[in-house]
Image: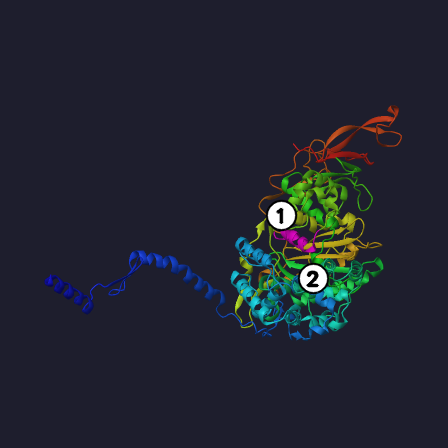
Amino acid sequence: MAKKEAKKKKKNEKVVKKPKKAKVSIKRFSFKFKKFKLPKLTRRKAILFGTPILAFVAVSIWLFWGIPAPGNLSDQQAVSTKILDRNGKLIFEIYSDERRSPIGLDEIPDYVKNATIAIEDKNFYSHGGFDLLGLIRGLSKYFTEGRAEGGSTLTQQLVKNSLLTPERTIRRKAREFVLSILVELRYSKDEILELYLNQIPYGSTAYGIEAASELYFGKETKDLTLAEATLLAGLPQSPTRYSPFGAHPELAKGRQETVLRRMVEDGYVTQEEADNAKGEELHYAETKGLNAPHFALWVKELLAEKYGDRVTEQGGLRVTTTLDLDLQEFAQEVVKEEVGKLENYNVGNGAALVTRPETGEILAMVGSKDYFAEDEDGKVNIIFAERQPGSSIKPLNYALGIKEGSITAASVLADIPTCFSVLGQEIYCPVNYDGEFHGAVQARFALGNSFNIPAVRVLALNGIKEFTEFTNSMGITTYTDPSKYGLSLTLGGGEVKPYDMAVAYGVFANQGVKKPLIPILKVEDWHGKVLDEIKLDEVEGDRVLDQGTSYVISHILLDNNARSQAFGTSSYLNVRGHPEVSVKTGTTNDRRDNWTVGFSPKAVVVVWVGNNDNTAMSGAVSGVSGASPIWNRIMRETLDKTETGYFDEKDEGHAWPLQPSNIIGMNICANTGYPPNDATPDCPQRFEYFLEDHTPEGGAFRQDIPIDRVLQQQATNDTAPENIEMQNHLVITDPLNTIICLDCGFPMQEVTISYPLIKQ
C-alpha cells in the first residue's frame, strides 16, 4: 500500500516540477501551452466568429478613416474653373471670387425658410438627420444601378457640400449618414438651417442665400418677393441645371412652380398667393464677363453632370473646348445685325450652330441674338429648343426614298392637285409654297425648288413609321411616336432641335457616317493632370446611310440650276468663292419658323430665325430673305478659315463631295427622267447620278386621253359625252401610279390617293 502511495506521490511531483503536455480544458476547447497550437475544432470556431468581426473592423476603417469632424462645417479652399476655346482663349471663368455674405436666421424672411424646407426637407424639424425611407431608396439605387443617391435631408446636404466629396458611392453615403447624426447632436435645428442657408451652393459664384439674392436679383435676402424666394429655393438641388443664367433658364421657372405647389400643400401659402407669385415677372441682375454665353453655360452643365457642381465651380478645372472664339464672336455679331434688319418683318430672334462634320467639333454656337436681350428672353438657347423645320426636313425624306430605291434623283413626281385620304382623319390636300402646280417634276428639281406636293408623295411611298425611324438613325431625337404625325411631317409638321439638324446634315456631309457633336476636347485640373481627353482621330462614327445616297442628296442641294426656278440663280444660297456648298431652306406655312441649313465636307451651318413665343413673322420672310443672309455670311467665314488649314492642314483647298464607287452617271431624257425609248427617241437630254442598283427602267409612252374640247382640259365624270374628244399624248406614270401628261399643255385633274399605301 505504501509503495503505491509513494509511486502516486512521485508521479504528482513530476507533474508539478516538469509538465510535459499540461492541458487546461474549458468545455470543449483545449489549448496546448507548449506549442500554442489550436486544435482543428478551435480554429474553425475562431474563423467562424472572428471573420465577421475582422470584416466589420475592416469595413469600418474603409468607411470612416479620415472622416472630417462634424464641427468642421467651415469654408473650403476653392480654385476657379476656366473654360477655354480651342486656341486657349478664355471663354468663361467659373467662380473667380466666391461670393459669401453670411446672415443670421432672424434676418431671413419666413417664406424664404419655408420655401427651402417645403422643397428640400418637409420633415426637417421632426427627423434626426436622415430620412429612413429615402436612405433605403438610395441604397437600392446603389445595388441596382451602381450609385447611391436620393433621400437627402437638409442636414445631409449640408454635410455633403461642406464636409464630403460629391461622388455617388456607398462609402460617401455611409459617411454622410453618420456625420448627419453627429451634426444633429451638436447643433440645434435652427443652427443647422442657418448653416445650410449660408453655405449651400446656389450656382455660379453664389454660396448662401444672401449671395444668391445679390447675384440673381441684385438685392438683399430681406427684400426678396415670394416669387424670387421660391425661385432661389429651387436651385440647390441642381444649381447648374436650374440656374436662370444657365443653359436652360426655362427649367428655373418650372422648378419655382414646383416649390410654390409644395408650399401650398404644406400650408405655408395660400393658392392665391402661389398663383400671384407664379405670374409675377422676374427681373434678373445682369450677368457680366461671359463670352459665348450659351455655349459656355452648356459646357458648364456638362461638366456638372460628370464632376458635380462643387468640382465644376471650385475644383480648378481647365477645360479646352472645340469652340473657335473668333468665329463665335463673328457669328454672334452677324446674327444680331441681320435679325435687327428684319425688325419690320416681326422677326425677333435668331440662332446659329457651326460644326466640323468630319470630327463633330462644335466651332460656334449662338443661342439667341443677344444673351442679355429681354424682348426675346435671350437666355433661352434656341439650339436645344424644339421648332418646326419647314422644308429643311425634306432632304431626309428624299434620302430614304433614294436609299430604298422607291425613287431616284430623276424620278418624275406628279406635282398636280392631290388629296390624301387617311382613315379616321380629315382629307389632306397639300399645296405648294407658290400656290402653283408644276406638272411632271423630277425629284432633283422637286427637292431643289422645295415643291411640297412631290415631297408628300415621297413620304407616302416611304411610310411615316419608316421615315421617323430613319430620321432617328440620322440624329433627329424628337420624332418618337409615328402615330402623332401625318403626311405633313415632310413639310415640317413635327418639331426638331437645331442641334439635331446639325447632326443629321452632318451625315450627308460626312458621306453617310454620323458623328456625335463634340464640345470639349480636354479637361485638366489646375495642376495640369489630364482628367479626360478626346482624340479626334479615334472618335468613331456610325454608318447610317450609304455613300451613294449621301452623294446624290449632297449633289442635288449644291446644284444651283436645280433650285433656280424657285430661288433664282443669284440668291444667298450661293456662297461666293465656295461652289461646293449644299444647302436647304425651310419656312413653316404659318411663318413661325425660318431655317437655312447648309454643308460642305468641311462645315455644317444651321441657322434659325423667328420668335421665341411662336409669334408669326410677317411680310416676305422666307428661307432666302430670313435665315439665308445669316447663313451665307457665317458659312463663307467658316470655309475661308477651314480652306486655309486653320483647323487642320488637310482641310486646305475646296472640297467637292467625292463620287463613291456605287454611283454611276448616265444621260437621260430631260422631260421623262428615263433613257430615250421608242416614244422619246429625240428627247432633250441631261446627265444624272444613280445608285448602281437603282438605275431607271421603263419610260414614257403614248396614250389616248379623254379631253373636254370645250374647256380644253382633261375630261371628268361631269363632262358631257358629246364634248369628249380622245387625244393621243405622251404620258408617264409616277411612283404612286399617277398618270401625268407631258405634252397636254393644260393641268391635270385632281387625284385622290388612299394612305397608307398597299405595298407589294
Q: For residue 10, which numbered disc appears in the image?
A: none
Query: On the rendered structure, is 145 left or right of 590?
Result: left
Q: Quadrant of the C terminus?
A: top right
* Image quarter of the N terminus: bottom left
In-front residue for pair 281/315:
281
- Give the camera-side residue of 250 and 404: 250
Any part of residue 740 in sight: no
Q: How many marks?
A: 2
Choose top left, top right, bottom left or bottom right for residue 668.
Answer: top right
Q: Main secondary structure of the magenta part?
A: helix
x, y percentage for residue 455?
Answer: 73, 43
Q: Relative to the observer, which residue lies in front, 707 or 271?
A: 271
In whole angstroms, how far apart are the C-alphas of marks 2 and 1?
A: 43 Å
> In the image, which residues are magenta?
496-510
Find residue 484 and report its horizontal and vertical position in percent. Answer: 72, 43
- Asked whether residue 202 is in view, the answer is yes
Q: Which mark is residue 473?
A: 1
Q: Secondary structure at mark 2?
A: helix
User: Hey, what amino acid is under mark 1?
Assistant: Ser
As drawn, the label of residue 118 is: 2
Would you identify the image quadrant in which residue 355 lies?
bottom right
Secondary structure of the residue carrying numbered label 1: helix
Measuring 83% from the left and 44% from the top, which residue is drawn there? Answer: 435
